[in-house]
Image (spheres, rainbow, N blue to C red):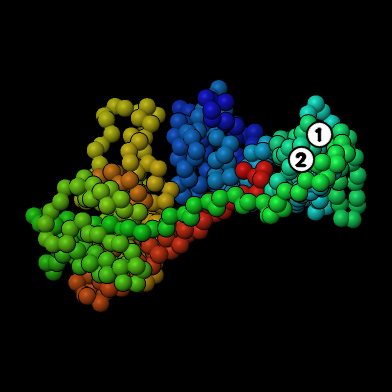
Amino acid sequence: MRGELELVAIEDVLAGLDAKLTTDPRGVAVTVRRGSHELVLHHRKSLASVDGDLKLLPSPAQYEAGHWLVPIEGLPRVLQPLLERPVEWRAPQRVLVIGPVAIPKLTVTSFASGELVRVVFEASESVPFRVQQESGRVTVAVSRDLVDAVLQPTRLAGGIVESVHYLGGRENLFAVQLGPRFRTLKATEQEAPVRLVLEFQGPPLSAAERAAPAPASGPTPRPPRPSEPEPAVRTVVIDPGHGGENPGARGPGGSLEKDVSLAIARQLRAELVNARGLSVFLTRDKDVDLELDDRTAIANNYKADLFVSIHANASRARGAKGSEVYFLSYQASDDDSRRTAQLEGAAEPLPAGASSADLALILWDMAQAEHLEESSSLASRIQEELAVVTGSEGRGVKQAPFRVLVGAAMPAVLVEVAFISNPEEEKLLTSEAYQAKVAASLARGIERFRRERAARLSSLHTPASPGRP
């Protein structure tokens, strides 16, 4: 335990799962390899990488006394792709489930009438029940690693039984809280269907109690419905790169990056507004220059759900072509990414002489930190659509320290749609028809991300069964 955080040594979790751990000699990173998959964790950082995809942990991993400690609740996120199996952390039972596991379902119903309260435990398969009467309560333990507990809500009036709760734990413990009128208990097990029936007897009712009208037997009030999730993506801010006295890259035919990026941004806005019904704003809608920090400030001011900065690439390498999509990193993926970031405006360099272990990822502490995983996902969806639809060579998703992405408080990407320095791609980029194709592909990538994000949010808002995490 570290404060309220619960951590576990990942080497203990992976024991027997054919994984190899290699710790950096300085203790700043560990690489876990299993087959063709690779997981990388960093000391005191919440970001992990699985096969190049970023995963955000609930709290930082820590390297202590030769052990790599990771938050228990974050294990499924990093282990599932590594192990190629379903992984789930069951907090009430204190069990990490790896792989498909048959879990018995246990439904608990209650019925109250006059001198008797009946509580029925019905299981989907044979399970061992252990009933124990304690002071003020009766407990039922089910000795299985896991159960799916479903308690049907029932109003228990009359003072014989107050409530029925699932406490969980290693014994999958249920507790029946006894009332002041409880007298005796009778427990009966049945085989078909598998049931445990508990009958709680109270004292005989007096003549006055028998004559009194029975309380209204309307249905138990439903618990309040959870609030509907907010739409996954409602507002998008599009940033046409450069502008004004900052023309950006220039093609061999004289075309300017600032003009191409604005034309595509306008097409994309129309696509998202007309076909998707989104609220869309441009950081600039005319030939003016904006400071890099002002561009993300506009997105933050509009409380945008996504930020997309559009650019056209340039390279001295003859024949360089294709699209690239970037999301933020404190260091570039490769030399080309570093060069591109310098051309488009890189973030402040890291302090000279400071080690990466001591820096604790300066950029991660900024606004974009909590959105990096979604930024990676958005970049992947856009790049997939852009490379296929335009017919250009897909150069992949990359990372670089773009200053324009640092301050974005939402998923943010920078798109290099093609190389304006390539005569063939320059000609395409100045074509209105091609610009429309690029805009349509960007819109499709955004829509894919939007749907996937909506599905994730919907699953988070689905009410869990009682006793489930």
The one of 411 and 248 positioned closer to us in this rendering: 411
Q: Seen from this angle, which residue lies furthest top?
A: 65
Is 378 situated left or right of 92 in this image? left
Q: Earlier in the sequence, mark 1 or mark 2?
A: 2
Is 329 situated left or right of 210 in this image? left
User: What is the crowding at mark 2: few (fewer than 14 residues within 10 Å), some, or many (at least 20)?
Assistant: some
User: What is the crowding at mark 1: few (fewer than 14 residues within 10 Å), some, or many (at least 20)?
Assistant: some
Q: Is residue 35 above or below residue 249?
A: above
Picture quarter with the C terminus: top right
The residue at which mark 1 appears reads as: 181
- Which residue is found at the position 50% from the left and 38% from the top? 58
Callout 1 secondary element: loop
Q: Is residue 122 above or below residue 358?
A: below
Q: Are marks 1 and 2 in contact (CB under 8 Å)?
A: yes
The residue at which mark 2 appears reads as: 158
Counting from the top left corner in percent of width and height, residue 39 is at 52, 43
The one of 19 and 98 positioned closer to us in this rendering: 98
Task: Specify the label residue 66 is tagged with.
Answer: none
- Which residue is found at the position 22% from the left and 59% from the top? 282
